[in-house]
Protein backbone atom coordinates (compact mmCIF):
# COMPACT_ATOMS: atom_id res chain seq x y z
CA UNK A 1 0.00 0.00 0.00
CA UNK A 2 1.27 3.49 -0.83
CA UNK A 3 -0.28 6.54 0.79
CA UNK A 4 0.91 10.14 1.03
CA UNK A 5 0.23 11.92 4.32
CA UNK A 6 1.10 15.32 5.70
CA UNK A 7 2.71 15.69 9.09
CA UNK A 8 4.30 18.31 11.33
CA UNK A 9 7.76 17.75 12.82
CA UNK A 10 8.09 19.13 16.36
CA UNK A 11 11.87 18.70 16.54
CA UNK A 12 11.71 15.07 17.67
CA UNK A 13 8.55 13.42 16.32
CA UNK A 14 6.42 13.61 13.19
CA UNK A 15 2.73 14.23 13.98
CA UNK A 16 0.31 13.29 11.18
CA UNK A 17 -2.27 15.96 10.43
CA UNK A 18 -4.94 13.30 9.76
CA UNK A 19 -5.72 9.91 11.25
CA UNK A 20 -3.77 6.99 9.78
CA UNK A 21 -5.40 3.57 9.71
CA UNK A 22 -2.48 1.26 10.44
CA UNK A 23 -2.21 -1.33 13.19
CA UNK A 24 0.25 -0.53 16.02
CA UNK A 25 3.87 -1.53 15.38
CA UNK A 26 3.45 -1.58 11.58
CA UNK A 27 6.76 -1.00 9.81
CA UNK A 28 6.67 1.78 7.22
CA UNK A 29 9.12 3.51 4.91
CA UNK A 30 9.06 7.30 5.12
CA UNK A 31 10.19 9.74 2.43
CA UNK A 32 10.42 13.37 3.53
CA UNK A 33 9.55 16.30 1.28
CA UNK A 34 9.39 19.70 2.94
CA UNK A 35 6.67 22.13 1.89
CA UNK A 36 6.56 25.87 2.14
CA UNK A 37 4.04 27.32 4.61
CA UNK A 38 1.96 28.68 1.73
CA UNK A 39 1.72 25.19 0.20
CA UNK A 40 -0.31 23.67 3.03
CA UNK A 41 -3.17 24.62 5.28
CA UNK A 42 -2.32 25.62 8.86
CA UNK A 43 -2.58 22.77 11.36
CA UNK A 44 -4.35 23.33 14.63
CA UNK A 45 -3.45 21.56 17.85
CA UNK A 46 -7.00 20.20 18.07
CA UNK A 47 -6.78 18.60 14.61
CA UNK A 48 -3.54 16.87 15.54
CA UNK A 49 -4.85 15.76 18.94
CA UNK A 50 -8.03 14.33 17.41
CA UNK A 51 -6.01 12.43 14.81
CA UNK A 52 -4.47 10.29 17.56
CA UNK A 53 -7.89 8.75 18.35
CA UNK A 54 -6.99 8.44 22.04
CA UNK A 55 -9.36 6.80 24.49
CA UNK A 56 -9.79 7.65 28.12
CA UNK A 57 -12.29 8.57 30.80
CA UNK A 58 -14.73 11.37 30.03
CA UNK A 59 -14.55 14.55 32.05
Image (cartoon, rainbow, N blue to C red):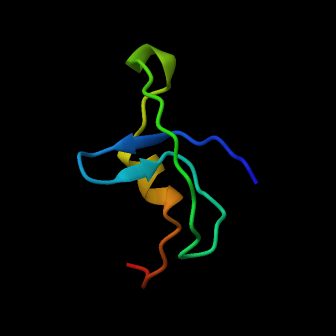
Residue 7, placed above or below residue 36: below
Asked which quadrant contains residue 19, the reply is bottom right
Residue shown at 64% from the left, 67% from the top: 22
The N terminus - image quarter: bottom right
Q: Is residue 23 left or right of residue 50?
A: right
Q: Position of residue 39 (x, y in %)?
A: 49, 17
Residue at the extreme right of the image, as rendered: 1
Q: Position of residue 59 (x, y in %)?
A: 37, 78
Q: In the displayed structure, does residue 10 sit left or right of residue 32?
A: left
Q: Residue furthest bottom?
A: 57
Name the image quarter holding residue 13: bottom left
Image vertical order of residue 15 relative to residue 42, above or below? below
Q: Nearer the viewer, residue 33 or 15?
A: 33
Q: Position of residue 42 (x, y in %)?
A: 43, 29
Asked whether 21 or 31 is in front, the reply is 31
Q: Is residue 40 left or right of residue 21?
A: left
* Side of 56 where 26 appears, left or right: right
Who's the residue at 50% across and 24% down the image?
Answer: 40
The residue located at (39%, 41%) in the rendering is 8
Considering every residue shown, the one lying at the far top of the view is 38
| Residue closer to the observer: 46 or 37 | 37
Task: Give residue 26's position: percent from left, percent from top.
Answer: 59, 71
Q: Who's the residue at 25% across and 52% down the image?
A: 12
Amino acid sequence: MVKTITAVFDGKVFHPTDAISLPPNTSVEITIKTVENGDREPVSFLEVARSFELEGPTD
